[in-house]
Image (spheres, rainbow, N blue to C red):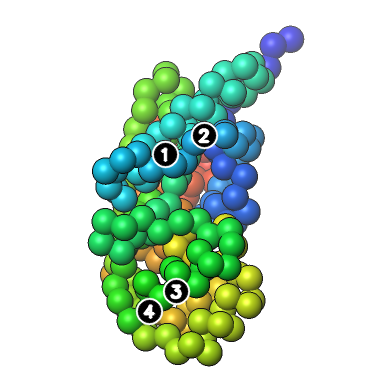
């Protein structure tokens, strides 16, 4: 006997980031499948930080949706992707993997304001692409040499856009934030919930198990 279709589309997350999984769990969302996609994240010549975040999110969502389409058990599904970019002016800071990158990012961020952009992209059950961009302004205090050396030594910066994690030790550096805090962590939750809700995946309905109303 054929099983009935799900009451709402299954959710595929186009990211293996533990950070994003924890953020989704914070609002009661547990993806049905995690299908990370491998894409080239190199910025194009002249590409703005906003444009890069939007483009990479869309490419990740579409690539992951193509993988999900090969798995009939997931149908119908929606695919969520996000990409976070940290920028000082138009300068895009790297997702740091080596000490030199982390040190350079801290020097640039020290005593200055910067912007964090997260592009959100959702491939719907009909194959349409829905997109949003969230921007947050963050200001760091002026960092001492000792503070920078200690942060680089702790290793928290590895794999982080801009070379820091606001939810970790680097929270001690932040003087001011204007906009979504969870955006800086890696996934703006209010905007993500709205995007999912537009496709029938309302996070608040999961809190009580009341999926059909």
What secondary structure is found at the residue carrying circle 4? loop
CA gap between label 1 and label 4 equals 27 Å
Report if the CB atoms under discs 1 and 2 are less than 8 Å apart. yes
- CA neighbours of label 4 inside 10 A, class few (<14), some (14 to 19), many (20+): some
What residue would you read off at disc 2? 39
Foreground tag (2 vs 3): 3
Residue 212 visible to an observer of this rendering: no
* Image location of residue 118, percent across then percent down: 38, 51
Please give the label number shown on residue 198. Answer: none
* Image location of residue 11, percent across then percent down: 55, 34
What secondary structure is found at the residue carrying circle 2? loop
Q: Which residue is at the front of the view, 21 or 160?
A: 160
Please give the label number shown on residue 56. Answer: 1
Q: Quadrant of residue 73?
A: top right
What secondary structure is found at the residue carrying circle 3? helix
What residue would you read off at disc 4? 110
- CA neighbours of label 3 inside 10 A, class few (<14), some (14 to 19), many (20+): many
Mark before the other along the chain sequence, 4 or 2? 2
CA gap between label 3 and label 1 equals 24 Å
Q: Which residue is at the front of the view, 148 or 83?
A: 148
What secondary structure is found at the residue carrying circle 1? helix
Mark before the other along the chain sequence, 3 or 1? 1
Report if the CB atoms under discs 3 and 4 are less than 8 Å apart. yes
CA gap between label 1 and label 2 equals 8 Å
Please give the label number shown on residue 106. Answer: 3
Quarter of the image for the N terminus: give it: top right
Residue occupying the far top of the picture: 1
Q: Taking 115 as reference, is 13 left or right?
A: right
Q: Taking 40 as reference, is 87 left or right?
A: left
CA gap between label 3 and label 4 equals 6 Å
């Amino acid at each position: 006997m054929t099983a009935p279709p799900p009451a709402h589309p299954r959710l595929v997350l186009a990211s293996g980031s533990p950070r994003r999984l924890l953020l989704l769990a914070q609002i009661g969302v547990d993806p049905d499948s995690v299908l990370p996609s491998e894409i080239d994240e190199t910025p194009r010549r002249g590409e703005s930080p906003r444009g890069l975040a939007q483009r990479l999110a869309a490419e990740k969502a579409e690539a992951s949706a193509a993988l999900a389409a090969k798995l009939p058990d997931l149908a119908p599904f929606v695919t969520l992707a996000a990409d976070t970019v940290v920028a000082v002016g138009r300068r895009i800071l790297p997702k740091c993997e080596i000490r030199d990158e982390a040190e350079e990012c801290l020097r640039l961020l020290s005593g200055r304001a910067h912007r964090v952009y997260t592009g959100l992209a959702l491939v719907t059950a009909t194959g349409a692409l829905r997109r949003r961009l969230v921007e947050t302004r963050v200001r760091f205090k002026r960092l001492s040499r000792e503070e920078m050396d200690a942060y680089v030594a702790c290793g928290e910066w590895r794999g982080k856009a801009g070379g820091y994690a606001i939810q970790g030790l680097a929270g001690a550096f932040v003087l001011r934030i204007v906009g979504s805090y969870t955006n800086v962590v890696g996934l703006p939750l209010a905007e993500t919930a709205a995007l999912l809700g537009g496709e029938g995946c309302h996070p608040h309905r999961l809190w009580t198990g009341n999926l059909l109303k």
